[in-house]
Amino acid sequence: MPLIRLDKFISERTEYTRSQIKSLCAKGSVTVNGSPVKRSDTKIDTGADDVTVCGNAISSERFRYILLNKPKGYVSSTDDKDGETVIKLVPPEMRSKGLFPAGRLDKDSTGALLITDDGALAHRICSPNNHISKIYAAELSRPFEQEYVEKFAKGIVLANGEACSPCKVQKAENADNLAFVELHEGMYHQVKRMFAAVGNHVENLKRISIGGLILPKDLPLGKCMYLLPKDIEQMFTKIDFDAILTIGHNFFSAN
Ligand code: URA
């Protein structure tokens, strides 16, 4: 592995600036392989050396891939002019400078949201050309009607005349007011507007998968986890929509 400067390594992977890293090193708060390193221009081997800052291990990976189980009340943005952002929910030790949400969930929607500093990957996830599907669980104010299946499969036309691509929708097995929808595109408020177009109303909306990656049952609302390379690969696999209906998560419980 190539040798790089300690301050460059840390600044690319955290929110610290190079001058902050210099003073943290001088204070003995930065260690390499367990020993404090006083000079921030020390060269390290990114493949072999273990670095900590204030006791937190710094991953050697260049980019962060974080899955958030988004709660209601946060905006999918880095700009807090419309309210608190999802970035606030990323614990400080998981943050890096360029983190942003890859894709959008409405302020009142919950569920799987990728937060990353890898712009190229985010583009691949969000670009409709890549056909990465997203599955949503929608709690409806009125019972699901079987005719929705055909209407969604033909392509819903929204109230303003915009046409949605054909997609799958299904009623959940044990609840008349719970539906699952699989989208391959991301128009503004799309799921809510699609159900409005068939005369229903979405009370609660949760994204439960991004590509083949399903929101883990044990990730509490408001919490983040690092995604591993295998999880990223999973996002680029196809999901079996019918299988999702039977996985048995209680999507609108406390979690
Ligand atoms: N569709 C919506 O209506 N809202 C979301 O947050 C995501 C998809």
Image: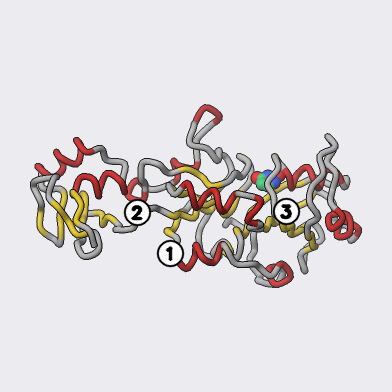
Residue 141 drawn at (x, y percent)? 80, 48
User: In the rendered structure, which amino acid carries the disc numbered 1?
Assistant: Leu
Marks 2 and 1 in Cβ contact (< 8 Å): no
- At x 58% / y 56%, what residue is drawn? 254
Q: Which residue is mark 2?
A: 62
Of circles 2 and 3, the one toward us is: 2
The foreground one among 68 and 62 is 62
Q: Is residue 171 left or right of residue 227?
A: right
For the N terminus, the image quarter is bottom left
Q: Is residue 236 visible?
A: yes
Q: Nearer the viewer, mark 2 or mark 1?
A: 2
Instruction: Determine whether 239 is above or below 204 in the image.
Output: below
Could you tell me if residue 74 is visible in this image?
no
SS at mark 3? strand
Q: Residue at x 21, y 65 (%)?
A: 48
Mark 2 and mark 3: Cα distance apart in space? 36 Å
The residue tagged 1 is 228
Q: Which residue is mark 3?
A: 138
